Amino acid sequence: MMADMPARLAPALDPMTILRGAVACAIQAPSSHNSQPWRFVRRGARLELHADERHHLGVIDPARRQLVVSCGCALYNARVAIRACGFCDDVRVMPDPERPQLLAVIELGLPRMPTDDDRALLTAIGRRSTNRRPFHPRPVGQDVADELAREARRQRARMFRLTPEQKRLLAGLVAEADRRQYADADFRDELGRWLAPAGSQRKDGIPFAEKEYGSPLPFTITRRLRTLDLGERFGELERELVRGSPLVVVLATDGDEPVDWLDCGQALQAVLLRATAHGLASAFLNQVLELADLREELAVLLGLDDEPQMILRLGHADPVAWRAPRRALDDVLTETDDAADAEADADVVS
Ligand SMILES: Cc1cc2nc3c(=O)[nH]c(=O)nc-3n(C[C@H](O)[C@H](O)[C@H](O)COP(=O)(O)O)c2cc1C
């Protein structure tokens, strides 16, 4: 659907249509638990990206770090779409300290000729999806890893490739994080609320079969999740997934403030789209970063002065046969030409 966006938009080229198309691309971004914690307002020829507090994951993400990272991913997709439609992307991040929910304002900049690379990244938006399966042992070349690191750097984040020994140590932290999280009733309850059973009409949440690394499980287990401690089992599974992944990377930023999280989200999506364009599958291992002591331990084991923000595994894998759902465009986008539209302004603030 995304691949033909510029062709469909090109003849029209009016800012409203392009910005609407940019939002259609933005909402294909990954988000923690597929919570899609974003809201867009198009005000004339200006597009605003707001954090949507109603989709905040209070247990795994009390500081809202992952919420802002997810919005950063959506922002990057919108920018890719605008460039592929033949305009520079003109973005101001966190423009109003009085309104912290307003994460970015996006406008069309000067016209420019879209490049093949712009088109390749646009196509990658529609092809990318999280692939939780084991990856094939086929290695990922250092040249590709270097290219991904450059993408991260351009968005003011750093990407570190783990050595085999660091991967082994990380696998231990992942298993520990899983054990601890699944032993926590609040964690299980929140996860249970965001797992969608097969055949569900929900437009958010993680389709449960996917969480199970591609093996469909009966819906009853979503309920059992609330009472069973599955940490050991998930921990062992994920330990093997880390060890078997040819490329495991950590994204990190200098600081640990909302603006750094937004940068990290853009870097994350830049890395994911470039990896997708190279035919690589990707998956997340963020449980380690959701527990403060393990996050610190990871920084020490990698010798990082920076703040670790995201852990990814990348490699070649059998494709995922279906896609996680998304909210409809009109559920996340308000369009108004009234600069003082109070309804469009109304952020939920908790
Ligand atoms: C900030 C962030 C954190 C995430 N953390 C995890 C994670 O720890 N484990 C996991 O399996 N997926 C994780 N995901 C992936 C989401 O579950 C996934 O993006 C969402 O279900 C939508 O599916 P898609 O990526 O296939 O479009 C994360 C995504 C983001 C953006």
Image: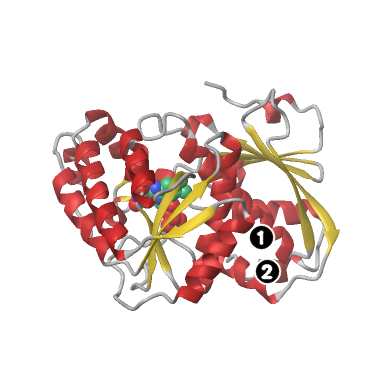
Check the image and report above or below for 266 versus 40.
below
For the question of whether residue 59 can be seen, the reply is yes
**Type of the residue with mark 1:** Val
Are there few (<14), some (14-19), or many (20+) residues within 10 Å of tag 1?
A: many
Pointer 2 residue: 118
Identify the colour scheme used: secondary structure
Question: Callout 1: helix, strand or loop?
Answer: helix
Report the side of 165 relative to 205 (left or right). left
Are there few (<14), some (14-19), or many (20+) residues within 10 Å of tag 2?
A: some
Residue at 68% in and 55% down: 79
Question: Callout 2: helix, strand or loop?
Answer: helix
For the residues labelled 2 and 1, say whether their Cβ atoms are less than 8 Å apart: yes
Q: Which mark is residue 337?
A: none
Check the image and report above or below for 133 versus 267.
below
Q: Quadrant of residue 32?
A: top left
Of pointers 2 and 1, the one earlier in the residue sequence? 1
Near-viewer residue (87 or 44): 87
**Type of the residue with mark 2:** Asp
Pointer 1 residue: 80
Q: Quadrant of residue 228?
A: top left
Check the image and report above or below for 166 versus 189.
below
Residue at 74% in and 56% down: 18
Report the side of 263 relative to 222 (left or right). right
Quadrant containing the N terminus is bottom right
Residue at the extreme right = 110
| Residue 114 percent location from the top left of the image | 75, 70
Near-viewer residue (143 or 128): 143
Residue at 57% in and 25% down: 348
Check the image and report above or below for 274 versus 24.
below
Residue at 69% in and 23% down: 98
Near-viewer residue (28 or 243): 243
